[in-house]
Amino acid sequence: MTSMLDPLVEQFSIILNSPVLSPNPDDWSMQMEVLKCLLQLIQNFPRLPEAKISAVLGPLWQTFVSSFKVYHLSIIQASENADNVGYDSDGSERSLESFEIQLFELWTTIVGNSMLAKVIAGNIKELAYYTISFQQITEEQVQNWSRDANQYVADEDDVTYSCRVSGSLLLEEIVTAYEDYGIDAILEASQVCFRESRELKQAGSADWWRLHEASLFALGSLSEHLCEAQDSGYNVRDLLEQMVTDIVGTGVHQYPFLHARAFSVVAKFSSLISKGICEQYLCNAAHAIASDVPPPVKVGACRALAELLPESNQSSMPNNIMGILSSLVDLLRQASDETLHLVLETLQSAIKSGGEQSTSIEPVISPIILDVWAQHIADPFISIDAVEVLEAIKNAPGCLEPLVSRILPTIGTILSKSKIQPDGLVAGSLDLLTMILKNAPAAVVKAVFDTCFTSTIQIVLESDDHGEMQNATECLAAFISGGRQELLVWGGEQGSTLKMLLSAASRLLDPELESSVSLFVGSYILQLILHLPSHLSPHIPELIAAIVRRMQTS
């Protein structure tokens, strides 16, 4: 095997020694194939003699460095024509971006190989430096994200196909492989990039902010490792504080993505960064969501508020939490898709942090959140977010009773006419009801019981929808947990409530039903046993027999 490699590695070295000079795929297609071959060799033959692969590392570095120069001009700055995107015979994209991603995958594999990692250990700082440089926001991303805030949020949250994400994976692998030495290298590389961005700014370059933002992005992607490193004696704090304070005073409209990144980084490193800087950014975020600033800045501000508000105390919070809540409600009216998820998350944090101040905005917030919930009932992510916001309102001082009074009439009507409702609305209503019942005082549980208990029982007995039956089962368990013995009295006619509860248990334990329908029946029966033991004891033999039959068929 090793003898076969010699001529192959020699040819690989010759091909990779040719610098990448153009974004045109025809000019580097052979290099691309070599990268793929090397990746397969290292992945499938990790014990190959390191000398064989080491011979090609120098030419590989030459390809990496030369391709960055082309990538910087044609993709990051878009000052050269880069509309050279095609597809090979396998349907894979042929573009300079895909070429760089292939390079990153190969470097990540090399760093992850214990033998090869030793060979390149002396060049890790340079590798980290170029990786961060590759992570600069491209002109295409600036255009796309400026037009579409949803795309910006989605690309920030998802592991998308880009140099930014591939670079983060490589930096993560460097920390894993080299530990403290790797962290040192990345911190030094970040400092160099930050210093270069300041030099570019002083020289009057319009693109100085990209390298600054990329440095923050790289550090943010390693926030967990770097927070631990600070505890181990590394001075991560000073570098971060210098990088975020340097942004204060620069134009929000001129550099929206830099300001957005600063908000995000302060949120991620709030445990490291000084309280004074966190408070400053908290105030700046509150101001940003209420101001006419570019959407990316508002996205970053929301991220900062979502993280910083729960950690702040009343004295360090902005004086007017009502202003934050009002601004978020305004944003909610404009939000959609990905931004809607972010605003709901931020609103939840603001309500939890607002304490008694949240009470006066309940009449404003609740109807809007209920409307969002109803409109997105088919989207589990948004509807769950909306329910969590409503739960935060419920737990705010003085908000439970008015919220229940607002919700109950509509939910009662939906459940009583469950068979004619749109898909998902009944299951969602039951989920909302369960949230209201949890840890609620007896008076609230009784109000919900009077309006919705019988309908919930009927859904368990008659519905064929798995989601409805699962949520109805959870809701009944919450009724029992909240009402306990009093539940049996609320039903009026003696024994009628217990009879309904047992009928529901019987249906859920029916061996003919699919097992997923009875997902929460165990919790339901446990609540019966815990809270109604004396009333349930005569029926225990029947219940046990039904449980055994159900288990035999599942």
Image: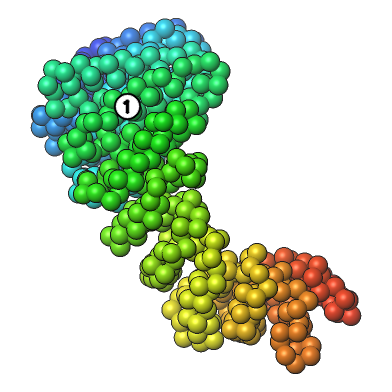
Horizontal and vertical percent position of residue 451: 58, 84
Horizontal and vertical percent position of residue 482: 69, 70
Locate the C terminus and report the quarter of the image it occupies.
Answer: bottom right
Instruction: Name the residue located 47 percent from the left edge and 73 percent from the top edge.
Output: 424
Q: Left of 111 or right of it: where is 243?
A: left
- Label 1 sits on what residue type? Thr
Q: Nearer the viewer, residue 144 or 5?
A: 144
Horizontal and vertical percent position of residue 24: 15, 29
Instruction: Name the residue located 23 percent from the left edge and 20 percent from the top edge.
Output: 197
Q: Nearer the viewer, residue 40 or 455?
A: 455
Q: How many marks?
A: 1
Observer able to see residue 511:
no
Observer able to see residue 230:
yes
How busy is the neighbourhood of tag 1: few (under 14 within 10 Å), some, or many (20 plus)? few
Instruction: Name the residue located 10 percent from the left edge and 29 percent from the top edge.
Output: 80
Horizontal and vertical percent position of residue 458: 62, 85
Q: Nearer the viewer, residue 4 or 138?
A: 138
Q: Secondary structure at mark 1?
A: helix
Q: Left of 460 or right of it: where is 189?
A: left
Check disc 1 and report the residue beneath it: 245
Please say if 397 is above or below 459.
Answer: above
Instruction: Name the residue located 58 percent from the left edge and 69 percent from the top edge.
Output: 436
Please say if 530 is above or below 447.
Answer: above
Please say if 541 is above or below 176.
Answer: below
